[in-house]
Amino acid sequence: MPQDSFDIHYTVNVSSLAGHLIDVSLHINLASNEGHELSLPAWIPGSYMIRDFAKNLVEISAKDKDGNAVELRKLDKQTWKLAANSGPIEVCYRVYAYDLSVRSAYVFDDFAFFNGTSVFLALKSHRDTPCLVTLVKPQLAPCDNWRVATTLPLANTTDHHEFGEYQAKNYNELIDHPILLGNYDVIPFDVVTPIKELGAATPQHTCQFELILAGGHRSDTKRMAEDLRKLCAHHFALFDDTPPVDRYLFITMLTGKDFGGLEHVSSTALLYSRDDLPSLAQADHMPDGYRTFLSLCSHEFLHTWHVKRTRPAVLQASELSQEAYTPQLWIYEGFTSYYDDISLTRSHVTGHESYLEVLGQTLTRLERNAGRFKQTVTDSSFDAWTKFYQQDASAINNIVSYYVKGAVIALCLDLHIRMNTHHTKSLDDVMRYLWQQHGKIDQGTPDDIIHRIVLEDMAMPLASFLQDALYSTKELPVAALLNEFGVTLHKRSRIDGSDLGGKPAPRVAKNQFGAAFKAADTGVIITQVTENSPAYDAGLQVGDQLIALDSWQVTTGNLLSIYQQFSPSTQVTLDVLRHQRLKQLLMSVEAAITDTVYLTVNDQTKLQKWLPSVKS
């Protein structure tokens, strides 16, 4: 399509690396007797918190075709009003891009990354109008070898990695394709699946994948491509339908220690530690950090169906200007969190033992979350905007994660369905129903969708389970269900603050402390205190600088080891600095609680009924 056929045309250029600036020119060839309203979204799909991206616009102005200034009046924090005009109009603005995350925009020496929600102003009355994007190669010396990584459809550009012209059929499509500019490695792989038409297998469908690694690395890319190919093939087989994508990118920004992922319609943006990717020297085993990376990729790719296409009706209708509340996030993030890990073993990337270890860690996170007794998983979903995404030190005591509890509910549902159908159906069938009856036909899901599928369509006697799991804070029947599938759930006390669970322990702590902490110049700083623990009952508070325990100076390295030397039912003194005043607290030593889970197999035959391989 020729450039002059687009009424909305964005030109994007990284103008300063040191200043972290992106310059945007928006050419509008649409007359308006009342004046166009322009706005940036307040949040980005997949991250349920008001981000106010417009705060990063540092300059904005408008002019007509003759270069004369056009009035541009700000209406609110994210909306501007152009004066009435006959067009064309050019709006020029500058974005400060220095948020190293998957949610916003970031510019520095090695690469520039941005989501459309941070960069592309929307025309309120023309959100359905096709638009053109010209990506300009920065005229800066460090950018000589920069390329483009995005799944935005090509316009006049002929190569997916070239600077030039891209297009989108409307604004929603425009902002659902993140863009990376910079030096990076491309690791390609393909997945071939049958095309499904009316239930019959016809010619094959090939999806082209690219793992994009920006930021430098020393990883075994051949291994990564092969493992990701198996995972992606698993997800295609899970939904048993022609895939909704022909090309998909894992856009990965590598740093020293960061972590994050955000799903998009045909790509994902990832932030990860380069040191946790696999090296050639680790070819004989699965490092924990690499397993987590694969789980992250699995999670985000599954969202291609489950939240990007199948999604709550309220999210489907949102224009991203304000919160869109839904109690369904436990379905979309919780189910995905269940499948992200189990898919690794179902696709033979890891074994059953590895999966049970990771599942034990998930169950440990829930077990240690005292907030599960105060907040339901549906309330957690609804309140994501103000509670889950804005956690403070009290979160451990007052909220439950819809990711973690949602994953455990998904586990229980899967095992319940398998038991009630004599292993002829599973949660996989629920996922396929959601796709066929909602995602594939772009129909949003109602709040009671799981009840409709499980109780009505599948006729499962699980009304009581769903009521307790979703609308109460009762404990879930995990141990009993796992035992039916040959797995025994064990609980033990934790070893120390670094103990994630999932494994038996050669030693455990005999005493419960009840507070998390970090290093200080002297002593430690208390970062979290669990209710009804010895630390809580002693009056220890978040922000306290704990200097000594029983007159012995403490550090992050010795605090717990000193504490373990005392016998339960004795008392110790805590010397604390609180707001520049020295306080002495008295703590009663209590026996450690069993808040750490690990799993063992007691019947391999029963286990195989739960963890069969999905054909790919």
Image (cartoon, rainbow, N blue to C red):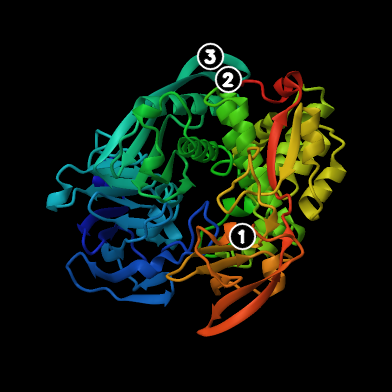
Frontmost of labels 1 and 3 is 1
Q: Quadrant of residue 506?
A: top right
Front in this rendered view, residue 263 or 602: 602
Position in image of residue 380 (x %, y %)? 68, 58
Give residue 257's position: percent from left, percent from top. 40, 50
Q: Which mark is residue 220?
A: none
Q: Is residue 26 above or below residue 137?
A: below
The mark nearer the N terminus, 2 or 3, is: 2
Observer able to see residue 239: no
The answer to whether residue 184 is visible is yes
Mark 1 surroundings: few (<14), some (14-19) or many (≥20) residues within 10 A:
many
Compute the Cα span from label 1 to label 3: 43 Å
Residue at (69, 57) in percent of width and height: 511
Spot occupied by residue 284 in the image (x, y as percentages of width and height): 44, 23
Mark 3 packing: few (<14 Cα in 10 Å), some, or many (20+)? few
Judging from the image, what secondary structure is the residue with disc 1 in?
loop
Q: Which residue is mark 1?
A: 384
Q: In this rendering, would 49 be left or right of 477?
A: left
Would residue 293 appear left or right of 71 to someone viewing this image?
right
Task: Give the residue type that dot 1 points to.
Answer: Ala
How far apart are the two marked residues, 2 and 3, measured between alpha carbons?
7 Å
- CB contact under 8 Å: marks 2 and 3: yes
Amino acid under label 2? Glu
Q: Name the residue nearer the viewer: 415 or 511.
A: 511
Q: Pointer 3: what residue?
A: 202
| Depicted 269 relative to depicted 587: above or below | above
Residue underneath mark 2: 197
Going from N to C along the chain, the mark reached first, 2 or 1, is 2
Judging depth in this view, the residue of 419 and 46 nearest the camera is 419
Name the element at disc 2: strand
Asked whether disc 2 touches disc 1, contact meaning CB atoms under 8 Å apart, the reply is no
Q: Going from the N terminus, do you reach mark 1 or mark 3 first?
A: 3
